[in-house]
Image: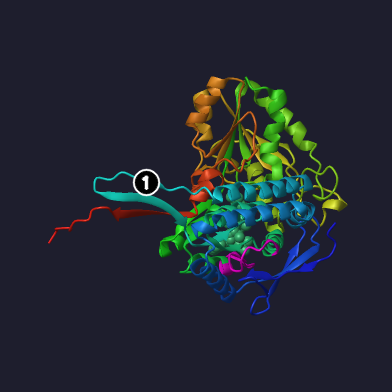
Amino acid sequence: MLNQMKTYQMYIGGQWVLASDNQTRKITDPANGNLIGVVPEATVMEVNEAVAAARNAFDNTNWGSADNALNRAQLMMALANKLRENAAKFAELDTLNCGKPLVESEGDVADSANCLDFFAGLATKTMGETVAVPMNMQSMVVREPIGVVAQIVPWNYPLLMGVWKIAPALAAGCTIVMKPSELTPLSILELAKLTEEVGIPAGVVNIITGIGEVAGAALVNHPDIDKIAFTGGTDTGMKVMTAAAKGIKNVTLELGGKNPVVVFADANLDKSAEWIAFAGMANQGQVCSAGSRILVEKSVYNEVIERVAKIVTHIKLGHGLDEGVRMGPVISKEQQDKVMSYIEKAKAEKCRLICGGSLPKGEQFAKGNFIEPTIFADVEPHHTLFKEEVFGPVMSFTSFDTEDEAVKLANDTEYGLAAGVFTESVTKAHRVVKQIRAGIIWVNNYHPTFNELPWGGYKKSGIGRELGKYGIEAYLETKQININLDEGQLGWY
Ligand code: NDP
C-alpha cells in the first residue's frame, strides 16, 4: 500500500526538473481528498525545453533510423517487462489517483504492458514497397517516423491512455513530449522512471506536468512539433485541431461518444443484462466508449430495465482499493457537479428515474466524489440525456418498435465512437452492425478492447485510429523515391 505522499519532478531531456518558477500542484485521491503527490506546474519555458530535447533526440541521434528498429523493439519489451514487475504499484497508484476499482487498474496495467509488446513487434515491420511506374525508374515507397510528437492524454485511464500513445510513437521512431491530465499525472511520471531504467535514450520521452490552457496549449502550438495526438473532450479537441491547422500539423483525435447499445427482444437476457450494466458503469461511466444510451425493443423494455437496475443497485461503491468495490468516485468535485447537473436536468425533463439519482449517503462517501449509479427510462431523442456525453455513472433507456427505428435511434448522435448490439440472430446482428456509423461495435458483449484492433471514432468522435497495425500508421510519414535507371540525357531543352 502506498502510504507516503511523494514529490515528483518532470522528465525533460533525461533530467528530472522542477518548474522554473517552482510552482507546484497538489494531487489528491478523489475518494477522500487525501494528498497523494505534488507535481511541478510547467510553464511555457519547460514546454520549450521539452520540445527542444525531443527535437534534438530526433534530429541528432539515430533513435528513429531504420537500423535502430530492433533496438527500439528490445527497449520497449524491456519497458513492458519492467511494468509487469511493478504492476501492483502502478495499479494501486492509478486507483489512488483516479478512483477506479483496483481490479480495473490491474487490467489497465496488464493491457499497457501488452500494448508495449504489441508495438515492439511492429517496430521491425514497417514495410515499404516497390512500385512499377511508366518510366525506366526504380520507384519505391518507404516509411519514416513523423518526427517530434505532442501527446496529450486525459484522466480516465492515466497509464493506459499514455501507453496507447507512447508505444506506437516509440515503435515508429518518433520522439515524444507528453502532457498527462493535470489531475492524474503520477503513473506516467513513474513510467518515465522506467524508461530511464531500461535505457531509452535521453530526450526520446519527455513528460511535462501542467495545465491544459498553459502547458497543453504551448505544446500543441509549438512550431517544432510535427504531430499532435490528443485524447479528451470534444471542445478541447476542437482547440487542438485549430492549433494543428495553424501549424499544418498532422493530428489524431480521440474524443467523446454517446454510444448506443441496441437490445433486441431475441437477445439472451440472462447473459446480456450484466454486459449492459458493465457498458454503462465501468470506470464510473467515465469512458469515451461507455454504452450509456440503451435502446431496447418494446416487448422486453421493462424486463431489461428491471434486470439491469437490479445489477446496478447492487454495485459496491467505495474506495477503489477496498475489497469487492466495483465503483469508485468520479475524478473531481467539478466532474461530480457536472454529472449531478445532468441528473437534475433529466429529472426536470421528466425522464423516469429508475435508480440512483443522488449522492450516496454515509460517512465513507462524505469526502469523496461519489455518485449513485443512476438509470433513467423513457429518455427520448429530444432529451439532453439522449444527446450529451455525461461521463459519469448515468445510463438512459429508450424503447423502439422496429429494426429500422433501432438503427435510426442508434445513429441519432453527433458522435460515432462505439456501439453494442444484443441479439441471438446472426443475420440481424450483421444487418444492424453494417448500418451503425461507429468505429467500434461489440455484439453480445461490451468493452473488451484489444491492442490488435483499431480504436477510434466516426463523426465528432475523432480522427484517426490508435492500436492495431493502424496505430503505428499514425506516427509514420510516407516517402516516394524514384531512382533513374536510364543512362541517357533528359532531352527536354
Ligand atoms: P479535456 O479535454 O479538457 O482534457 C484532456 C487533456 O487535454 C488534458 O490533459 C487537459 O489538460 C488537456 N487540455 C485542456 N485544454 C487544453 C488546451 N487548450 N490545449 C491543449 N491541451 C489541453 O477533458 P476534461 O478533463 O476537462 O474533461 C472534460 C470532458 O471531456 C469530460 O467530462 C468528458 O466528457 C470528456 N473527456 C473525454 C475523454 C475521452 O476519453 N474521450 C477523456 C476525458 C474527458 P488539463 O488536465 O490540465 O485540463
Observer-nearest of 468 and 329: 468
Q: Is residue 243 above or below residue 49?
A: above
Whether residue 483 appears in magenta in the rendering, the answer is no
Element type at marker 1?
strand
Q: Tell me if 279 is positioned left or right of 175 in this view.
A: right
Residue in view at x 52 percent, y 27 percent: 432
* Among the 4 quarters of the image, the one containing residue 479: bottom left
Q: Could you tell me residue 346's position as x and y percent? A: 64, 43
The residue tagged 1 is 130
Q: Could you tell me residue 485's position as x and y percent? A: 27, 53
Amino acid at the residue labelled 1: Thr
Q: Quadrant of the N terminus?
A: bottom right
Residue at the left extreme?
493
Whether residue 208 appears in magenta in the rendering, the answer is yes
Q: Could you tell me residue 305's position as x and y percent? A: 69, 29
Residue in view at x 72 percent, y 55 percent: 82
Residue in view at x 62 percent, y 72 percent: 42
Instruction: Please say whether residue 143 is visible from this viewpoint.
Output: yes
Q: Could you tell me residue 344's position as x and y percent? A: 67, 47
Residue in view at x 76 percent, y 62 percent: 28
Which of the four quarters of the rendered structure image does ligand 1 lie in? bottom right
Q: How is the image coloured?
A: rainbow
Disc 1: CA contacts within 10 A as few (<14), some (14-19) or many (>=20): few
First to last magenta residue range: 197-215
Instruction: Please say whether residue 156 is visible from this viewpoint.
Output: no
